[in-house]
Structures are given as structure tokens and as C-alpha cells.
Amino acid sequence: MTDTIDQAELTVERAPAPDAARNRTALALLLAAVFVVFLNETMMGVALPRIQEALHIDATQGQWLTTAFALTMAVVIPITGWLMQRLNTRPVFAVAMSSFTIGTLVAALSPTFEMLVVGRVIQAVGTAIMMPLMMTTVMTIVAAEQRGRVMGRVSIVMSVAPAVGPIVSGALIQVLPWQGLFWVMLPIAVTMLAIGLRKVPNVSETRKVRLDTLSVILSALAFSALVFGLSQIGAAAVGEAAVQPWIPIVVGLITLGFFGWRQVVLQRTDSALLDLRTFRSRDFAVSIAMMTVAMVSLFGAFIVLPQFARYTLGLEPLWVGAILLPGGLLMGLAGPTVGKLYDRFGPRPLVVPGSIGLAVSLWTFALALGEGSSWVVLLGAHVLLMLSLAFLFTPAFSSSLGSLPPKLYSHGSATIATLQQVAGAAGTAIFVALYATGVAGTGDANPDLPSAAAAAEGSHLAFLAGGILSLAVIVLALFVRKPGVPADIAESAEPAEQPVQ
């Protein structure tokens, strides 16, 4: 046991940690790049109606601009684990930012809906690579006792970009054609690419790993089928699904089983596309389980809240975005403080109150909001929701990846990012389906423009599901703990040792 721990300590000590200035440069550039791609991802929702009008498409077609983006993310993210082992930091950054830049240009020049979808798909490839790259780089160059603080900065990016995205999009779409969203983003992307090609240092260690073609095919089919099937649940609730949701979901689950089996076989030679030995770490498994359930509630709430504010409270889109802005900003501002508290006290004193706050906010949405409600109640519950998530996500990221040996950082980052996409699709699907069911149950003749009562009933049903899910988050939070020195669970020759607590 002692030998194993000593070897693990040596592995951690020998992780690439050159001069502090180089590390700060790498983190600053990656944080800025992730902010840009996250901002782009969250700007599309407000602009969809304008794009639909300009290109003469209906809402079902328009949703493919977000569905195709999510499908691409789900397909590409599992490959990033292999990519970050095969290539160094700067080349991976170049691939990601170049793809995002090219996709932005294609979208800006698009004369047709089909070409716009292609542009969004190319953008999604870069976005899919960027987040795991940043997380892996953080784990590689930041000392264990400082990771909570740095993860707090990461949470600023993850919360502020989605918070300001709808506001920025709403303001631009008032004065520019829809192409203006991409033309504004293009010079920013080009600048980030140019600076990154010069300034992003190589901080990772590479090794030759064979890319298993069968694993790529299985992962692409499994995750895209799951995301697509989940995205069709809401449409099926109102009789507009392109295919019955259970068909792609079953195909995805069966293929996912074959994908998992293939990875277990390849792990014996350290050549898995997505190494599942990360789940041998109890702390990794518990932390990402809690985070995944919380993500389902988060994405679901994000999709229903604007519907309630718009149709039940009668607020204009710009005011809806303004009400949702303070919560996102406060979540970002709380990130560094939460990170420092994690470094000092560990995750449990943070995630338990965070999970309780999440439950209180979602049950408030479910039981206290309805016709005649004040927007002040909505604002207060949303602020509580976002602050609670700040106390959940930063500790969860730090605890999960911190429990792994360095050689599994890239696989852990890719696994988390993949589950985020699936959780996002599941949350959106579940909440939209329940919302549509609630609206339809009122007998409303126009579900596309529901009455205040119908929207309130649909929102109540969706948030009730969120409140029930939040109870599972509380239970999981009780089992999250700060990882000790990770034993080398990646070694296949002998069983893994348990982390020292």
C-alpha cells in the first residue's frame, strides 16, 4: 500500500508544472476562449424567431440549429480524451479554435438554412474540444491545494457567459440582421486564434495512442441517438416528433452497452477511446452523479423559465433576459469564493447547503409561481438557484477530477463533458415534454401561443419534476468528499488501491 501511495505522490509531483507565468498565460487564454464559445452557444435561443422569419422555416426546423449543435458535441467530446493524449496543448487549441472560427464564417455567409446548420456543426466541433482541454490543463498545471480556487474562476466562465448571452443576442438582433450575430463573433474568434497560436504553451505530455475506429463509430451512434431521442420527447408530447423518441433512445442505449464493452477490452492495453477506469474512483463516480442530476434540473429550468415569464407574467424577451441576468452574474462572482472555501474545508460543507438551496428554489418555482405572481418572486428564486449551483459545481469538478491519477485527467474531463451534454438533452426533453403536456391538458387551442393559465399549468408540472430530482441531489451531496492522493487506478495489472482519507 505504501509503495503504491509513494508512486502516486511521485506521479503527482512530476506532473508538468513549469514557471508560474507560463501557467497563468495558458489558463487566461483558455478561459477567454471557453467564454467565447460558451457565449456563442447561448446566443442562439433569442435569435431563433428572427432566423425562422428570415429563412421562411417553422419552429420545428429552426430547432435543428440547437439540436445539430448538441448532437455534434455529443459525438465529438468522447474523442477528445484520445486527442489530448496524442497532441500537445497548443495543437489541440489550434484545432478547436480553427474549427470554431471556420464554422462562424460559414454561418455568417449562409444564404440558406442548410448551410447555416453546417456552420453550426463546424462551430460545435471546436466547442466540444475546448472545455475538456481547459479542464485537463487545469488539472495538469495547478497544484492540488489550489485547484478549488482555479475551478472557481472556471465557474465564472460557465455561469456568466450563459447569463449575458441572451442579453447580448437580444440587443444585437434589435439593430442587426441575424447574420450580425456571427459577424460580431468572427473577429473575436480570429483574435483568440491568432493570440493562442503564439501564446498558448505546451503544458501536457503526449504519448502514442491508437485511435480505435470501432469505438469512434459506436460512441458517435450511441450518444447522437440518445441526444436525438431525448430531443424528440417534447415534440412527441404535442404530436410533432420526426420519429417516436423511444426508437433512437433504445438504439442509443444498446449501442452504448457495446461501446462500454469495447472500452473495457481496450483498457487492458491502455488504448480505450474513453477510459472507464475513471469510475473505479468512488469520489469521481459520486461527484459526477450529483453533478449530472443537478444539470438535468438546471437545463430543464432554463428552458421553462422564459416560457413562464413570457406567457404567464407577460414580460417582453429583453426583460426576461434582464430578470435572469443577476442570478448568472452572482453565480460567477461567487465562484472564486466557493473555490477558496473548497481548498480550505473540502466539498461537503459546500455541496450539502448548495443541494438544499437547489431544492428550495425548484420547489418555489413549482408551488409559489402562477397567475398573478410577482416577477420579484421569480427573480429571488432564480438568484437562489444560481447561487446554489455555484456551491455545487465548483466542488464537484474539483473533487471528481482530483480523485484521478494524471494519466486519466483527459478521460475524466471528456467523460464529464459528455455527461453534461446528455444531461442537458435529458433535462430539456423532460421539462419541455411536461410543460407541453400541462399546456395541452388545459385544452388550450393554441399551444404555440399559450394563455397565461395554460403556461402556468405547464410550468408547474415541469418544475414539480425538477423539485423531485433535487431531492436526489441532496442525497448524493451527503456522500461527496475531498479526494486524498489518488492511487494509480489506471494500472491494469493489479487491483486499484483505495484513496487515503
Image: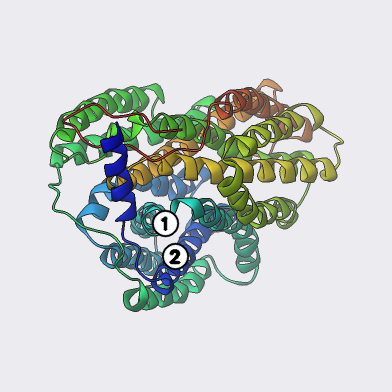
In the rendered structure, which disc, 2 or 1, sits on the residue that comes first in sequence? 2
Which one is in front, 75 or 34? 34
Label pair 2/1, CB-CB below 8 angstroms: yes
Rendered image quadrant of residue 456? top right
- Residue 286 at x, y = what percent? 47, 29
Image side of residue 197 versus residue 185, left or right: left
Total numbered circles: 2
**Labelled disc at residue 125:** none
The residue shown at (79%, 33%) is: 369
The residue shown at (19%, 37%) is: 215
| Residue that numbered label 2 is attached to | 27
Can residue 5 be seen here? The reply is: yes
**Labelled disc at residue 138:** 1
Q: Residues within 10 Å of mark 1 (few under 14, many from 20)?
A: many
The residue shown at (73%, 31%) is: 360
Image side of residue 62 versus residue 340, left or right: left
Q: Secondary structure at mark 1?
A: helix
